[in-house]
Amino acid sequence: MKKKYIFSKTKKGEDKNIILFIGDVFNINIDDVENFEKSQKRKYRIALVTSHDLDLNKKAKQKGVEKRLDFILRCNTRNITEIKKAIIPIKNEVVIVFCYFESWMPLYARLEKLLPNVNLPSKESLKICNSKFEMRKRFIKYCPEITPKFMLVNKLKEIKDVAQKIGFPCITKPLNLTKSRLVIKSNNSKELKNNLKHSFKKIKEVYKKVNSESRPMILAEEYMEGDLYSIDAYVSPKGKIYLTPIVRVVTGKDIGIDDFFNYYRVTPAVVSKKEEKKAQEATVKSIKATGPTSVTIHCELMRTFNGFWKVVEIQTRPGGYRNEMLELSFGIKHHENDFLNKIGKKPNIPKKIKSYTAVFEIFPEREGRLVSIDGLEKVKKIKSFQRYQQIKEIGSMCGYSKDGHIYVLLVVLNNYNKNILYKDIKKIKDIIKINVE
């Protein structure tokens, strides 16, 4: 258990030593701080600013997280006066700030003026990067070649406008949600009408479930055919960009399922140096167009079948599982680099391939209550097995991401032999079965 500190002013000449998390925190985040302490050979105190009613000891977060925090600053996170009052006791001692969840980005943005001596992304850049509509408007202005056509859809009667401005097939998606929730393809006006009815019916509930402050809204976009990739990048306080290796993302659509969830991610990605350079150029353009600094960026890209690189979205946080994937495959300590970048130090990005890694997010084949998961013992026996984690509890509702659900099971594979890894990737779909009723 970490030592509990009393509130105190930093003495003149002393280094600031508080790491502040925004909105929510997991044990794994605190583990990252402790690893960073070892690498830097110094101690930090850990604080969290969050709402009055957030339960920090949910089973999914692993129990005991609250005991590992030095300060828990609870307030009405939508009231700037209350936020200011909550952080006053520590504001002069904060050295690094982290926000890893989209739903807490509005709170993150409110801290810009309250912590003027800390390296933070601007309020404007956070707003742009966490609204797909604002993000696309910036792309159109500064680098139109990386974005598909798009428009807001507020009412069903705007279906004709979508047909005229976007055409079919098209994609509809919420402005501020992640993990492909409520992302749906429509091939014609009739499908679009039904899909919009479905999304408008579900969207308020899903936004509420993820504690999002943003107004629930739907964006329609030109449907793009191609392969999905992602790149994480560190953007320094001065705007210098450091890119990590590209990751291939295989979606539900890619394996014949009518949904856009990320079925698995794999790195190193099988892509030519020429194409990776084009992906990197598109990533840099998206960062310069949206303007964030002092942050790690997650950029999702598509290489269309006609050879163009388009940006699906850009987010002001590390990509999912990138810390584990990049360390296993390259020896890149992603979260440690995130820490270093925020205090103005150069991140360490080894290029040599150590191994091959894949991370699966597995969904059931239909909506229902989770009864059981078959194949867990069998999956442990495949050569590339690294670990698995059950996300949904037995008895909980689950389904596809297009209906607002998250995945049931996480599986991580790793192997020094690329051919063995890809053989084991093919086995997962047959081994794992999510049973619902």
Image (cartoon, helix red, strand yellow):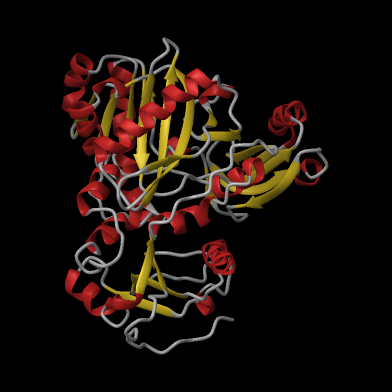
At x 25%, y 35%, the residue is: 289
- Percent of width and height locating residue 417: 76, 31
Which of the 4 image quarters holds residue 414? top right
Relative to residue 19, is residue 395 drawn left or right?
A: right
- Percent of width and height locating residue 355: 70, 37
Relative to residue 119, is residue 388 drawn left or right?
A: right
- Answer whether residue 151 is visible to the viewer in this image: no
Q: Quadrant of the N terminus?
A: bottom right
At x 18%, y 32%, the residue is: 155
Q: Nearer the viewer, residue 298 or 276?
A: 276
Above or below, 154 relative to 117:
above
Relative to residue 25, is residue 235 drawn left or right?
A: left
Q: Quadrant of the C terminus?
A: top right
At x 66%, y 38%, the residue is: 357
Above or below, 26 relative to 196:
below
- Percent of width and height locating residue 237: 32, 53
Q: Nearer the viewer, residue 269 or 407?
A: 269
At x 60%, y 23%, the residue is: 270
